[in-house]
């Protein structure tokens, strides 16, 4: 597994949670990207990596699709419930 070379950014608050949930579910990035497409969100691997590293802003509709793809609530992604 590749580790990030730079510290997390400050462009979003869900990136680290996306990584953690995805890893708990043993989902690789490419599998996650495919699942996101089934929910209408087509983003590149680079864009997902930047999102997870908190170096990319996240649109509201993306948060909804990500939550659905990870089978969690939007609130959980936003840190409202742990």
Image (spheres, helix red, strand yellow):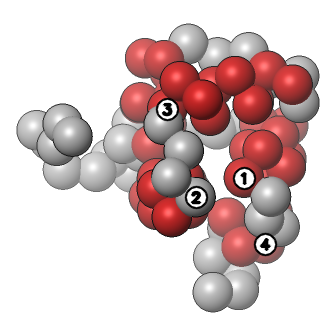
Q: Quadrant of the C terminus?
A: bottom right
Dot 3: what SS? Answer: helix
Instruction: Report how far apart the C-alphas of labels 3 and 2 lie in the structure.
Output: 11 Å
Badge 1 density bin: few <14, some 14–19, many ≥20, Cα 10 Å: some
Dot 4: what SS? Answer: helix
Instruction: Report how far apart the C-alphas of labels 3 and 4 lie in the structure.
Output: 22 Å
Residue contact between numbered discs 1 and 4, judged by CB atoms under 8 Å:
no
Q: Earlier in the sequence, mark 3 or mark 1?
A: 3
The circle on residue 75 is 4
Of residue 70 and residue 55, the one placed in the foreground of this image is 70
Dot 1: what SS? Answer: helix
Give above or below for 28 relative to 45: below
* Residue for badge 1: 70
Q: Earlier in the sequence, mark 4 or mark 2?
A: 2
Badge 4 density bin: few <14, some 14–19, many ≥20, Cα 10 Å: few
* Residue for badge 2: 25
State left or right for residue 17 relative to residue 58: left
Instruction: Report how far apart the C-alphas of labels 3 and 1 lie in the structure.
Output: 12 Å
């Amino acid at each position: 597994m590749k580790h990030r070379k730079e510290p997390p950014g400050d462009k979003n608050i869900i990136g680290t949670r996306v990584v953690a949930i995805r890893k708990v579910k043993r989902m690789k990035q490419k599998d996650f990207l495919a699942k996101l497409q089934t929910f209408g969100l087509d983003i590149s691997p680079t864009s997902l990596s930047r999102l997870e590293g908190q170096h990319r802003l996240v649109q509201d509709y993306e948060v909804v699709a990500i939550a659905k793809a990870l089978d969690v609530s939007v609130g959980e992604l936003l840190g409202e419930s742990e």
